[in-house]
Amino acid sequence: MKSILSILVLLVMLAVPGMGAANVLPQYNQSWADTDNGGANIWGAFAAWNTFWATDNGNQLLVVNTTAASLLGINLTVHSGPFIQGALGDKMYILSVNKTYILGPFETSRFLQTNGTILIQSNATRGKAFVVGVP
């Protein structure tokens, strides 16, 4: 129930211009572009390999915006970690162009790497993303 509520709040946040993520979700974790939680630019560009810090409470949502830079979509692989739940394996997403997706939550018990991050591999550097920690 809490995950559904968090997703709904995130959708409202995306729909209403000018709402800062830090003001709406107190569990805002980190983005690649704005690690100090200032909210000036929470969108970060994709690289072939991307990491973000895992939250202490164990769940993160990844908001991805694919761009229409080409006719191809983006394949994302969230790599499982070396811990017990990591045996469930990686999670792969195939995303179409020119859309916004909310992916996750990514439980740390499955996806946490030994350095405290969650690792995402992309086949493209098209698109932007940010991460929100949820309770």
Image (spheres, rainbow, N blue to C red):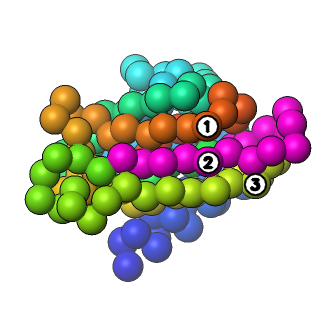
Position in image of residue 49 (x %, y %)? 47, 29
Residue 124 on image: x %, y %: 66, 33
> Which residue is denoted by mark 2 in the rendering?
75
| Position of 135 relative to 46 (above/below) | below
Look at label 3 and name its amino acid: Ser
Whether 54 is drawn above or below 126: the answer is below
Question: Circle 1 is placed at which residue position?
Answer: 123
Q: Are marks 2 and 1 in contact (CB under 8 Å)?
A: yes
Looking at the image, tell me whether mark 3 or mark 2 is earlier in sequence order: 2
Task: Check disc 2: other Cα within 10 Å, few if <14, some if 14-19, many if 20+.
Answer: some
Q: Are marks 1 and 3 in contact (CB under 8 Å)?
A: no
Instruction: Give x and y (percent) for residue 85.
Output: 18, 62
Who comes first in sequence, dot 1 or dot 3? 3
Label 3 vs label 2: CA separation? 9 Å
The residue stretch that appears in magenta: 65-79
Are there few (<14), some (14-19), or many (20+) residues within 10 Å of tag 1? some
Q: Residue at x 56, y 38 (%)?
A: 122
**How many numbered discs, if any?**
3
Q: Image check: 92 left or right of 124?
A: left
Amino acid type, residue under disc 2 in the picture:
Asn
